[in-house]
Image (cartoon, rainbow, N blue to C red):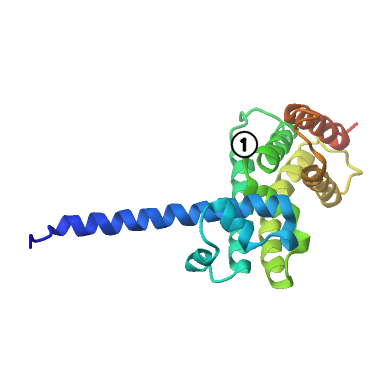
Amino acid sequence: MPRQRPGHAHRRVGAEASKSARTRERILDAAASVLSQNGYAGTRLSDIAERAQVQPPALYYYFASREELIEEVIALGMARAMAHVSDAVASVAPEASGMDRICAAVAAHLEVVLRLSDYASAAIRNGAQLPADMRERQLAEQRRYGDIWRGLIEQARADGEVHPDLDPSVARMLILGGLNWATEWWDPDRGSLRSVIHTAQLLTRNGLAAR
């Protein structure tokens, strides 16, 4: 019997690990899609398995429970939303106004939850449906995301761009609430994302603006 070369075994282990990682990612992608469409209560492991093209028992090789799988999707969704918005704000020209940065954040938020990421959409749409312990952990991430917006509004206010009578905290919650609600009503067949973004930016800019 021919001896197996040492490198061959290592390559085989590496290929198996890579295949396992791809399957895990495919399961997460499927879970994000199902969760975004069906909500927490309507998300079934059988639907996730079917979309991921695996047998339902195989899910438990990668995740201990339905809740563990959903929580990872939610965590990834919040992380992707934060990263996309942070990158968009960072790419704004240094000489741009604080209001320009807020509007860049508005566009990025709508892009990521409406088009770019089922994960972000799932995180935004299902927060209130999560079990108490999972919800508490998600709220901690939401507060971190809210800090990005708090900083943007406070800077614009310090620069005199925000109406002095506005409560910055209330303004932030109203803006984010309006943006998040778009996941419930926007239909790409009835209006372009560009139009939604433009309208949201106009409302935000004019609603916050100092006289």
Give the vertical position of 166 relative to 192 (above or below).
Answer: below
Viewer-closest of 48 and 32 = 48
Residue 6 sits in quarter = bottom left
On the image, the x and y values in percent for residue 20 come to: 41, 57
Residue 41: x, y in percent?
A: 74, 63
Residues 58 and 103: in front is 58
Q: Is residue 157 left or right of residue 107?
A: right
How many C-alpha atoms fall within 10 Å of the one at disc 1: few (<14), some, or many (≥20)?
some
Query: Toward which corner of the image does residue 11 lie, by quadrant?
Result: bottom left
Q: Amino acid at mark 1?
A: Ala
Q: Residue at x 60, y 57 (%)?
A: 48
Q: Position of residue 148 (x, y in %)?
A: 68, 48
The residue carrying mark 1 is 88
| Residue occupying the point 59% across, 33% down | 91
Quadrant assignment, res 195: top right
Q: Is residue 73 left or right of residue 210?
A: left
Picture coordinates of residue 161, whole percent (x, y): 81, 34
Residue at the (71%, 50%) spot, across then down: 37
Q: Nearer the viewer, residue 167 or 139?
A: 139
Quadrant containing the N terminus in the rendered view: bottom left
